[in-house]
Image (tube, grey):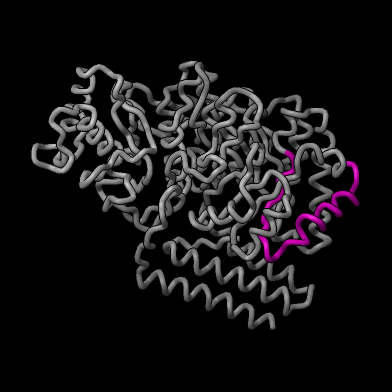
Amino acid sequence: MRITLSVGELGVEVASIFEVFTVKLLSQMLPRKWEKIIFLLIFIFSSASGAFIGINIGTQMSSLPSAAEIVSILKTQRIKHVRLFDADHQMLNALANTGIEVLVGVPNDQLLRIGESQSEAAAWINKNVAAFVPATNITYIAVGNEVLTTIPNAALVLIPAMQFLHSALLAANLNFQVKVSSPQSMDMIPKHFPPSTASFNSSWNSIMNQYLQFLKNTGSSFMLNAQPYYVYTKGQGIFPLEYALFQPLKPNNQIVDPNTNFHYTSMFDAMIDAAYYSMRSLNFSGIPVIVTESGWPSLGGANESDASIDNALTYNSNLIHHVLNGSGTPSQPTISVSTYVLELFNEDLRPGPVSEKNWGIYVPNGTALYSLTFGRIAESNADSTGLVGVFCVANSSVDSNALKKGLDWACGPGSANCTAIQPGQACYEADNLVALTSYAFNDYYHRTQATGGTCNFGNTAMITTTDPSHGSCIFSGSSGSSTSTTGSTTIGSAFGPVGAVSEASNLQVISFAFIVASMLLLLF
């Protein structure tokens, strides 16, 4: 478990390293009877941590990178939380001693066997969890995925499977470290706006009551797959795209729950609140929501125009910023929502439309489709969002008058820094309107993307990962540019320096270590 103290990235890393070291040391030195106490202490400290951003690692692809290659990407980008859809032993071994928190999954096709036999559940825990901890930091088990809406015939074994697995964890003294839950689809909530009137599909009330009671009894979280992309596209214009992408809404487009008067600035928050109100409709409260899937596809078919790299980058960047800001929802403003982004790689073998195969940030060969910052941004250069390897350029097939109009807007009301494309400057090309416009569009995009700016300009621009820099003309986002993001990690770029941590922050980290060390001495 990662212990977050809100004292800067250095404090977070020191606490994480200290925790991993402590767990390994104690597992070797202390009698088994003390392990439960140690895991309880760690759980208490970690429960005070802020929300985290993790990532899903799917495997439905024709060319899957090796476990070592995947973990190398995670380490380079300092991604500290991953969700596996199974309990692949190569991945679990590769994740050992990394400190990365791991959510392992029980695939749907194994649910029946485990839900019908307590001994099978115990064998699954011994083989896939107990054999790897504490070296591999497994913290959650996701039992199936959207079971009630995808394989309803297995509904009757869902709760027994969760109970059997929890009992096996209890027998192995791992129940304080590893929690059990089951990801639910938003389809379980037929009408989720306004959130205050939301409730689960009544045909599943008996199962949901048992599910929620299990979560309450074991201190676990409600796992939810929340994908605004589907709600937006199925809504056919009911909600504005900006609402789905966490972008500012126009004054006449405000989204308000008429029963609570809560203003919703993002579809994501409304979906989370719909889950909270649905639990309340069954008389359950105090169960936190953890989002096990949320993202946006970067490519779609002919009728999926909203699946684009620009929208994927915008959604995921804003999602990460929203979660790591500690932002709660209108109904639960003090409870932030940890979220796993869907997903690390495109999965070309997933069934369905083109968009289903293109939720990844990477293609399987390790090439980044777009740059994404995983982590809190302590400081940002005023001229850049820290996105490296992504560029907004003019579409050369567009009418020159439209490009000239976009150029004038970018350098005028858009406040792009167009100095470099003035006569005599490095990026000036007198007879190349596309090049001049591309520089202005890209500068505007990098300045404003973090606050909702897009690469559109009346459909005259497009996203590319090909660096248009040339000679001494360097575009924002180029690996050769001087702009950087401090204290953050960007997928598709080298890891930059960690922002300075104040003396007070260092003292807090030292104090934390002293407190835990004192507890350990008392135990001895």
Q: Residue at x 58, y 55 (%)?
A: 71
Where does residue 377 sit, x and y in percent of width and height?
A: 38, 53
Q: Residue at x 52, y 46 (%)?
A: 366
Placement of 357 over or under 496, stated as above or below: above
Q: Nearer the viewer, residue 425 or 371?
A: 425
Q: Nearer the viewer, residue 226 or 109?
A: 109
Where does residue 487 sit, x and y in percent of width and height?
A: 38, 58
Q: Is residue 290 left or right of residue 318?
A: right
In the rendered image, which quarter is residue 176 located in?
Answer: bottom right
Q: Is residue 238 visible?
A: yes
Residue that sits furthest to the left in the current view = 424
Magenta stretch? 116-144
Q: Is residue 186 left or right of residue 78?
A: right
The number of callouts visible is 0
Placement of 207 over or under 502, stated as above or below: above
Q: Is residue 430 left or right of residue 164?
A: left
Q: Is residue 143 magenta?
A: yes
Assign the C terminus to one quadrant of the image: bottom right
Where does residue 414 sit, x and y in percent of width and height?
A: 21, 32
Q: Nearer the viewer, residue 277 or 314?
A: 314
Q: Residue at x 53, y 58 (%)?
A: 75
Q: Is residue 181 visible?
A: no
Residue that sits furthest to the front in the current view = 471
In the rendered image, which quarter is residue 365 located in?
Answer: top right
Where does residue 30 sit, x and y in percent of width and height?
A: 74, 78
Placement of 522 over or under 168, stated as above or below: below
Q: Is residue 161 left or right of residue 401?
A: right
Q: Nearer the viewer, residue 185 or 58?
A: 58
Assign the N terminus to one quadrant of the image: bottom right
Placement of 52 over or under 344, stated as above or below: below
Q: Is residue 158 magenta?
A: no
